[in-house]
Image (cartoon, rainbow, N blue to C red):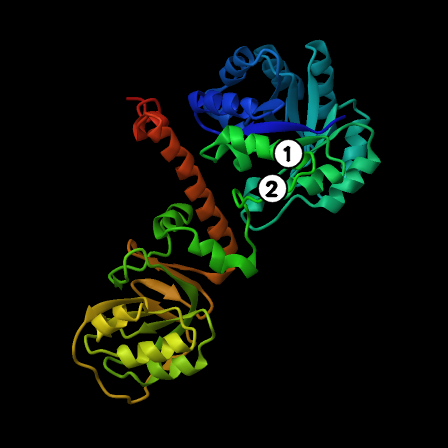
Amino acid sequence: MEPVLQIALDLMHIKRAVEIAHESVDGGADWIEVGTPLIKSEGAEAIRILRKEFPGKKIIADTKTMDVGSFEVEIAAKAGADVITVMGLADDSTISEAVMAARKYGAEVMVDMLNVSDAVERSKAVEKFGVSYICLHMGIDQQMRGKDAPIDVLKNVVSSVSIPVAVAGGITAETVGGYTEAGASVIIVGGGIIKTTNITEAAKNMKKAMAGSKINSDLAKKYGEADLFEAFSRVSTPNISDAYHKQGIIKGLVPHLNAGQKMVGRALTVQTANGDWAKSVEAIDKAKDGDIIVIDVGGGDVAVWGELASESARIMGVRGVVIDGAIRDIDDIMAMGFPSFARHVVPNAGEPKGYGGIGIEITIGNQTVRTGDWIIGDENGLVVVPKEHAVEVANRSLDVRERENRTREEIRRGSTLSKVNELAKWEPVK
């Protein structure tokens, strides 16, 4: 079959979903998916509403059924779904029951291979039950860890079955061409379209890319370890706080930044005593380009850093300094554009005695920081992200930012924040 574009409405509110679906169809979307979050939020009524809104379009109910396949297919099909999804991890009887129920109601079954260890063998097995589609799916939580739907597995699945194969998971206008070339018949796109301010244009670009055009877009792009500086530079500390469930906030340190300036880099840690600036300055010689020197002085009020240290660090490629203690010469430091955070600004410095250490685990602002952890600071505050969680937190922060952009667009069109999120509807029942 000619590849079709399926828009995944992974949203909470049916009103927003309908609007986004119309804009997607205007841009060329072929199939409309009632996403799992939307079904869980609004129930089968979401399927009915979208069926009525789009009588000529194929409606996919992404129920992700794991049990009672016959019953759940009956519910979705009676509500107007043309295709219902069942998980490849489900029992064989669940899938076969789902297929038999679908036949009663003129519907089809798509089997989702999310988390199936051997998608090729499972695809061949479920095809024998009479399913209509296979979906090779890289879940959103997996995408946040920098994973993409594997094209080599897609090719093997396509060559192993005789039914159409869908692919889903972080697909963008830049990457979709590889999936169509590998034989995908259904391209399922969520964030790559529904998070844009111009959904119609995004859908058009996706269709062009599916047809072979080269489209440059960083929307819904997922970042790996090598690209974390770029990823964290694109988000704010509030974005990170939302994505990281309010963890990692370094409290009590004041930003000294020029307007709009940000600080992003990996921590090089220092521990020293109040006023002892020897280890702070020695750390400059050990720093790598892109590091941020993070100094634990236990909140001391005698400076361990100043203008000359900042100039030396800046020349060595250090991206900023964070001090749970005191800094001085802040006017000169800001004039040179060197980002800094400190608990105190004072005129007096101490003496270079050499106590403490470099590269050891420290605590600043009630947060543990290790060398190699990511430090992100802006005018809103300061965050540390442990290095082992950095890829996931960066990608989730970008997701927060992109979803906010869509909300911002709806507000500009005349809505309000409470209306966009239907706050009154979702308040606890009293």
| Vertical position of residue 75 compared to residue 41: above or below | above
| Vertical position of residue 185 compared to residue 259: above or below | above
Q: Residue furthest left?
A: 347
Mark 2 is on which residue type?
A: Ile
Residue sitting at 42 percent across and 83 percent down? 285
Please tell me which residue lies in front, 280 or 44: 280
Q: Which residue is mark 2?
A: 215
Location of residue 127 in the rendering, given as x and y in whole percent from the top left corner: 79, 28
* Residues at marks 1 and 2, CA–CA distance in whole angstroms: 8 Å
Residue sitting at 43 percent across and 52 percent down? 234
**Residue 212 appears in view:** yes
Location of residue 329 in the rendering, given as x and y in whole percent from the top left corner: 22, 75
Please tell me which residue lies in front, 1 or 70: 1
Q: In which image quadrant can residue 197 be found? A: top left
Mark 1 is on which residue type?
A: Lys
Badge 1 vs badge 2, beta-carbon distance below 8 Å: yes
Location of residue 211 in the rendering, given as x and y in whole percent from the top left corner: 69, 34
In the image, 313: left or right of 227?
left
Quadrant of the image for the N terminus?
top right
Q: Which residue is mark 1?
A: 208
> At numbered mark 2, what does the secondary structure look like: helix, strand or loop?
loop
Q: Residue furthest bottom?
A: 353
Quadrant of the image for the C terminus?
top left
